[in-house]
Amino acid sequence: MARINRSVHFLIYSSKYEEIATAINTTVNRGVTVLDGTGWYSRKPVKVISVLVRKPESSLVFSIVHSIDPEALVSIADVSGVFGSGFDKIKAK
């Protein structure tokens, strides 16, 4: 399914999650979700930032994360089909 409006999903692991989440929310104007997790090896609680953005916004997200925590672990995945506020409208048949 080829889409003109490509989007990406970020998962960001950082102890500076509050600062990063706030910066993404205010600078990129995207909603951010902070998830609770547990590092299985360390058995320590971790916070994981989840954010969906349009592909052209991804470099700005990377820049924000790097400026706040250059040691953050960042995973990015291309997604096809993001529907809802700020993305494509849900079309019912």
Image (cartoon, helix red, strand yellow):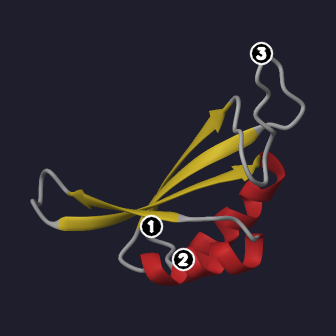
Q: Are marks 3 and 2 in contact (CB under 8 Å)?
A: no
State the residue position of label 2.
20
Which image quarter: residue 4? top right
Which dot, 3 or 1, sits closer to the camera?
3
Relative to 15, is 42 on the left or the right? left
Q: Work out whether mark 2 precedes mark 1 in sequence or the reverse, and give the earlier one.
A: 2
Say what amino acid the circle numbered 1 marks.
Ala
Residue found at the very far front of the displayed protein: 93
* Location of residue 52 in the rendering, given as x and y in whole percent from the top left corner: 64, 51
Q: Nearer the viewer, mark 2 or mark 1?
A: 2
Residue 10 lies left or right of residue 12; in this view the side is right
Residue 1 - label:
3
Alpha-carbon distance for marks 3 and 1? 32 Å
| Image depth: mark 3 or mark 2 in front | 3
Q: Which mark is residue 72?
A: 1
Q: Position of residue 80 (x, y in %)?
A: 70, 29
- Whether label 2 touches label 1, CB < 8 Å: yes
Identify the residue at image location x=35%, y=77%.
15
Rendering quarter of residue 48 = bottom left
Element assignment for label 1 = loop
* Residue 38: x %, y % from top left: 19, 58
Considering depth in this image, is 27 or 88 the residue closer to the camera?
88
What amino acid is found at the position of numbered circle 2 in the picture? Ile
Estimate the spatial distance between the alpha carbons at disc 3 and disc 2, rounded to whole Å.
32 Å
